[in-house]
Image (tube, coloured by chain):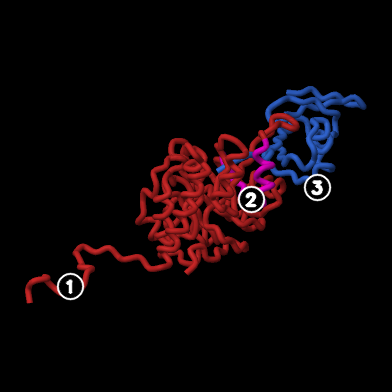
Chain colours: A blue, B red
């Protein structure tokens, strides 16, 4: 379990495609993607298994422990 | 009679009845040439978790986008309706298409579709405005339920994915065609040889979707061309009226009996 730290330097831990990431508390999904270097159009996103549309990322605040998955197009049959 | 005809797939008027998968080609260039040789106007894609920003795919996706063909993303790898619905929404956003090849695997050995999860996902996605192409088995009642849920297109397997066995149950496929005359039927999976594709088209199927038989050929570009011809040939044969098999001989040369007996 992550220990919550209140105040301006509070951080929250989330996972992105299974890897642990520390974010400022209250960070949005759009901020996370920018931190990771993903262009907004380059990936599709889900949080805790639910699709989050591109135009909702700015207002989608990540809770501590959120599981984010980013997908891209690949070849397929 | 035109061997190609006009093929209405969902709301797209196509001339090609050959849908091509894009996985497993030795290079992007071979894929591009194979799409051209196939005459394909629809190709399938997948989605995968991205591992790193800007992770390279060696140019395959750029080649596919540049080819100008319609994209049919799939939900490969999904084991539940929930997963498939989520992935379909991601695909629609990423690729700007409402078409989705719906795959929900129910058995790890055969990769057989799960009919219950498939139906649940299809029902939801139709409500969400998708054009759902469900990859299903050849079971008639399952197929009817998918149609009841709003699917206009069905893609029953010929055989398990990548097995190359051809049409292992032609009777079931023939029954689907007979019982679902207004549904677009596409044989998907199991096609190993051009003759398998011809057989599917001769059964009255509207199109064929395949990947491995082309991608894994020694010469994928030539094999794509071979399948193109096979599909066109099968369709032309079907439209021309196939001779019904019978259990007795029927002389073809009109000699009128034995040549020296009057």
> B149 left or right of A23?
left
Residues in magenta, as a range: B59-77
**Which one is in front, B190 or B106?**
B190
Instruction: Name the mark nearer the viewer: 2 or 1.
Output: 1
Residue at the image position 74 percent from the left and 44 percent from the top: A52
Q: Is B60 contained in the magenta span?
A: yes
Label 2 crowd (10 A; few <14 / some 14-19 / many >=20): many
- Residue A55, which numbered label? 3
Q: Quadrant of residue A10?
A: top right
Instruction: Name the mark nearer the viewer: 3 or 1.
Output: 1
Kindly report the distance in space between the C-alpha atoms of the residues bearing marks 3 and 1. 78 Å
**Which one is in front, A56 or B28?**
B28
On the image, the x and y values in percent for residue B181 come to 46, 66
Where is mark 2, residue-wise?
Answer: B71
> B73 left or right of B197?
right
On the image, the x and y values in percent for residue B33 come to 59, 44
Label 1 crowd (10 A; few <14 / some 14-19 / many >=20): few
**Which one is in front, A64 or B241?**
B241
Instruction: Name the mark nearer the viewer: 2 or 3.
Output: 2
Kindly report the distance in space between the C-alpha atoms of the residues bearing marks 2 and 1. 57 Å
Where is mark 1, residue-wise?
Answer: B255
Residue at the image position 52 percent from the left and 40 percent from the top: B215
**Which one is in front, B51 or B196?**
B196
Label 3 crowd (10 A; few <14 / some 14-19 / many >=20): few
On the image, the x and y values in percent for residue B183 come to 50, 63
- Residue B79, which numbered label? none
Chain letter of the residue beneath label 2 in the structure image: B
Q: Judge if badges 2 and 1 mark residues of a common chain.
A: yes
On the image, the x and y values in percent for residue B141 come to 43, 57
């Amino acid at each position: 379990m992550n220990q919550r730290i209140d105040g301006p330097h509070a951080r929250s831990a989330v996972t992105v495609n299974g890897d642990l990431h520390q974010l400022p508390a209250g960070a949005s999904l759009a901020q996370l993607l920018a931190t990771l270097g993903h262009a907004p159009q380059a990936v599709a996103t889900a949080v805790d298994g639910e699709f989050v549309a591109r135009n909702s990322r700015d207002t989608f605040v990540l809770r501590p422990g959120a599981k984010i998955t980013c997908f891209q197009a690949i070849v397929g049959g | 009679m035109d061997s190609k005809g006009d093929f209405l797939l969902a709301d797209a008027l196509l001339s090609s009845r050959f849908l091509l998968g894009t996985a497993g080609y030795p290079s992007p260039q071979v894929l591009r040439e194979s799409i051209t040789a196939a005459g394909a106007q629809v190709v399938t894609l997948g989605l995968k978790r991205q591992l790193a920003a800007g992770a390279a795919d060696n140019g395959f996706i750029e080649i596919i986008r540049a080819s100008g063909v319609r994209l049919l993303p799939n939900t490969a790898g999904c084991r539940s309706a929930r997963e498939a619905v989520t992935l379909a929404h991601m695909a629609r956003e990423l690729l700007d298409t409402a078409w989705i090849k719906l795959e929900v695997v129910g058995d790890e050995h055969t990769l057989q579709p799960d009919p219950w999860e498939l139906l649940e996902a299809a029902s939801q996605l139709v409500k969400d405005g998708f054009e759902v192409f469900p990859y299903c088995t050849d079971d008639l009642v399952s197929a009817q339920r998918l149609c009841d849920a709003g699917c206009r297109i069905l893609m029953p397997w010929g055989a398990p994915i990548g097995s190359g066995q051809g049409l292992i149950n032609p009777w079931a496929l023939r029954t689907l065609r007979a019982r679902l005359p207004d549904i677009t039927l596409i044989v998907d999976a199991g096609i190993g040889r051009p003759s398998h594709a011809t057989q599917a088209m001769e059964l009255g199927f509207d199109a064929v979707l395949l990947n491995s038989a082309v991608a894994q050929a020694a010469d994928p570009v030539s094999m794509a061309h071979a399948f193109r011809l096979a599909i066109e040939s099968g369709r032309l044969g079907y439209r021309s009226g196939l001779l019904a098999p019978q259990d007795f001989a029927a002389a073809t040369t009109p000699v009128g009996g034995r040549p020296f007996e009057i």
